[in-house]
Image (cartoon, coloured by chain):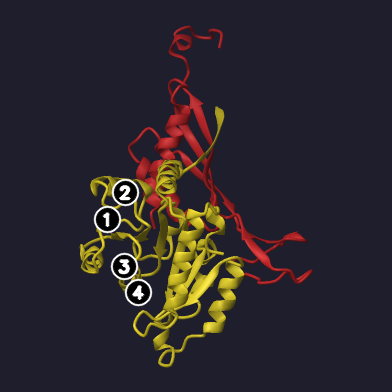
Chain colours: A yellow, B red
Amino acid sequence: MTEIDVKQKVLAANAAAAAGLRETFARTGTLVVNLISSPGSGKTTLLEKTVAVLKGSLSLGGLEGDIATERDAERLRKMGIPARQILTGGSCHLDARQVERALADEGGRLSNLDILFIENVGNLICPTSYDLGEDFKIVLLSVTEGEDKPFKYPAIFSKAAVTVVTKIDLLPYVPFDLAAVREQVATLAPDGRLVEVSATSGAGMDAWLSLLTDALAKKRAGVPAAGVAS
Amino acid sequence: MHEMGVAAEVRRIARQAVADRGPGRITCVRLAVGDLAAIEPELLKYAWEALVVGTPEEGAALEVDWRPATQTCRICGDLPGRAPGSWLRICPRCGGILSVTGGDDLDVLQVVFEEEDNPADRAVPGGAR
């Protein structure tokens, strides 16, 4: 009987692909954000509103992960930016190799952008573990989901550099303890940023948009990724 | 939720580790799984069992070394004895801000491999081993 020490990361192949993507994005100066949330928290709606404001001054693109339908990519294309749907066929997360392939299949239409939005499969668990070469992860939590989510899903809330509380226009109608969420996020991600927005009313959108444009400016100025969102 | 894919990757890594060892059998694979790795050890073991049925790894054990995330104070160091699911914002000793560290391990640590007897040895009963 022989014991062989291996000490190898199970997700090493994904990590290698992510490192390659990160190098490419560094060369092109593209800010890449990986948006993660449960289904229906408003990722695509927030992106539509974001694109409407920023597309005049910045080149934007989207990669949309879903298990089925082209719907989200179509919504972004309608907003006037290039977008590609990655259908995972039931898989619960996007993998860096899927991102690689999607970018290659687009033949350059999603390269050399100012900002690439990667909208992950709606799921607060699995996407957390898969590096996609992004500058940072953004987790969204809508007020209709309840305020207990950060401690229920500590991995994503501790790893996301930015937490976006969405649908705050609904706060008068739903029991949601915003202070409790702020406290939990501050506990899990003491260096993270929290923004509170309503894509419908426009509340908080200025803070969200400047977070993105500041992060892009910092990336272009060579500030390391870890400091981008702080 | 993606335990099956992880189990397949674990087997690929284990097979690679023993590739040049000659005939034999993997009897155990030891893994480190972190608190924040989005992997449920129990489900990973079920996935492993389903994956290896009818393959050379059938019967090989999957052992999981659980790695909890820790909360760390810049001044006092790691906070000992954190109950699962309980998180503190400030250090109970000095009141400093705590950070969350570790717990994202998902590594193959060790593969236990049982070599088959060398057929040449078997041909000579009592022959030198």
Q: Which residue appears at 61% of the width and 70% of the height?
A: A187
- Secondary structure at numbered mark 1: strand
* Residue B93, numbered label: none
Frontmost residue, A195 versus B2: A195
What's the amino acid at mark 1?
Ile
Residue A198 seen in render: yes
What's the amino acid at mark 3?
Gly
Q: Is there one chain holding both mark 4 and mark 3?
A: yes
* Residue A86, numbered label: 1
- Quadrant in which the C terminus of chain A appears: bottom right
Q: Chain of mark 4?
A: A
Q: Chain of mark 3?
A: A
Q: Quadrant of residue B58?
A: top left
Of circles 4 and 3, which is in front? 3
Q: Compute the Cα span from label 1 to label 2.
A: 7 Å
Q: Which residue appears at 46% of the width and 54% of the height?
A: A129
Residue at numbered disc 4: A42
Q: Position of residue B26 (x, y in %)?
A: 46, 32
